[in-house]
Amino acid sequence: MLPIRLLRILLERFSCIYTLFLRLYLGMFLYNLLLLFISISLLLHSTFEDHVPLCLIFFLYFLLLVT
Protein backbone atom coordinates (compact mmCIF):
# COMPACT_ATOMS: atom_id res chain seq x y z
CA MET A 1 0.00 0.00 0.00
CA LEU A 2 2.86 2.37 0.77
CA PRO A 3 4.44 2.21 -2.74
CA ILE A 4 1.09 3.09 -4.33
CA ARG A 5 0.68 6.13 -2.07
CA LEU A 6 4.28 7.18 -2.74
CA LEU A 7 3.77 6.74 -6.47
CA ARG A 8 0.64 8.87 -6.38
CA ILE A 9 2.40 11.65 -4.45
CA LEU A 10 5.31 11.61 -6.91
CA LEU A 11 2.94 11.74 -9.88
CA GLU A 12 1.09 14.71 -8.39
CA ARG A 13 4.34 16.60 -7.81
CA PHE A 14 5.77 15.78 -11.23
CA SER A 15 2.55 16.72 -12.99
CA CYS A 16 2.70 20.10 -11.26
CA ILE A 17 6.32 20.56 -12.41
CA TYR A 18 5.39 19.34 -15.91
CA THR A 19 2.53 21.83 -16.10
CA LEU A 20 4.85 24.63 -14.98
CA PHE A 21 7.42 23.77 -17.65
CA LEU A 22 4.67 23.46 -20.26
CA ARG A 23 3.38 26.92 -19.39
CA LEU A 24 6.89 28.38 -19.49
CA TYR A 25 7.56 26.75 -22.86
CA LEU A 26 4.26 28.00 -24.27
CA GLY A 27 4.99 31.50 -22.99
CA MET A 28 8.47 31.50 -24.53
CA PHE A 29 7.03 30.21 -27.82
CA LEU A 30 4.45 33.01 -27.96
CA TYR A 31 7.11 35.57 -27.01
CA ASN A 32 9.35 34.27 -29.82
CA LEU A 33 6.48 34.54 -32.30
CA LEU A 34 5.91 38.14 -31.22
CA LEU A 35 9.60 38.96 -31.67
CA LEU A 36 9.59 37.25 -35.05
CA PHE A 37 6.59 39.31 -36.16
CA ILE A 38 8.29 42.52 -34.99
CA SER A 39 11.52 41.55 -36.79
CA ILE A 40 9.71 40.81 -40.04
CA SER A 41 7.71 44.04 -39.87
CA LEU A 42 10.90 46.04 -39.22
CA LEU A 43 12.60 44.27 -42.10
CA LEU A 44 9.76 45.00 -44.49
CA HIS A 45 9.42 48.67 -43.55
CA SER A 46 13.11 49.56 -43.55
CA THR A 47 15.05 51.34 -46.26
CA PHE A 48 17.76 49.72 -48.34
CA GLU A 49 20.57 51.12 -46.16
CA ASP A 50 19.01 49.54 -43.09
CA HIS A 51 18.67 46.08 -44.63
CA VAL A 52 22.14 44.80 -43.81
CA PRO A 53 21.97 45.15 -39.98
CA LEU A 54 18.33 44.10 -39.88
CA CYS A 55 19.02 41.02 -41.99
CA LEU A 56 21.90 40.14 -39.68
CA ILE A 57 19.71 40.59 -36.60
CA PHE A 58 16.93 38.55 -38.22
CA PHE A 59 19.34 35.77 -39.15
CA LEU A 60 20.82 35.63 -35.64
CA TYR A 61 17.33 35.61 -34.16
CA PHE A 62 16.30 32.79 -36.49
CA LEU A 63 19.34 30.76 -35.39
CA LEU A 64 18.38 31.38 -31.77
CA LEU A 65 14.81 30.33 -32.49
CA VAL A 66 15.86 27.11 -34.23
CA THR A 67 18.32 26.07 -31.53
Image (cartoon, rainbow, N blue to C red):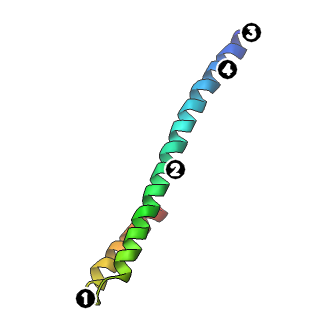
- At 56% from the left edge and 30% from the top edge, which residue is drawn? 16
Report helix, strand or loop for mark 3: loop
Per the image, the residue denoted by label 4 is 7
Q: In this view, does 9 lie to the left or right of 26?
A: right
Looking at the image, which is closer to me, 7 or 52? 52
Looking at the image, which is closer to me, 44 or 52? 44
Residue kind at label 1, given as amino acid type: Glu
Instruction: Looking at this view, name the residue that lies furthest to the bottom.
Output: 48
- At 46% from the left edge and 63% from the top edge, which residue is drawn? 33
Residue 49, numbered label = 1
- At 38% from the left edge and 82% from the top edge, which residue is drawn? 44
Q: Position of residue 25 (x, y in %)?
A: 50, 48
Per the image, the residue denoted by label 2 is 26
Instruction: Looking at this view, name the residue that lies furthest to the top.
Output: 1
Camera-side mark, 2 or 3: 2
Q: Where is residue 35 in the image (x, y as percent from the top left)?
A: 39, 64
Q: Position of residue 24 (x, y in %)?
A: 48, 44
Report helix, strand or loop for mark 2: helix
User: Which one is earlier in the sequence, the residue at label 4 or at label 3?
Assistant: 3
Residue kind at label 3, given as amino acid type: Met
Q: Distance between the residues labelled 1 and 2?
A: 36 Å
Camera-side mark, 1 or 4: 1
Q: How far apart are marks 4 and 3 (CA)?
A: 10 Å
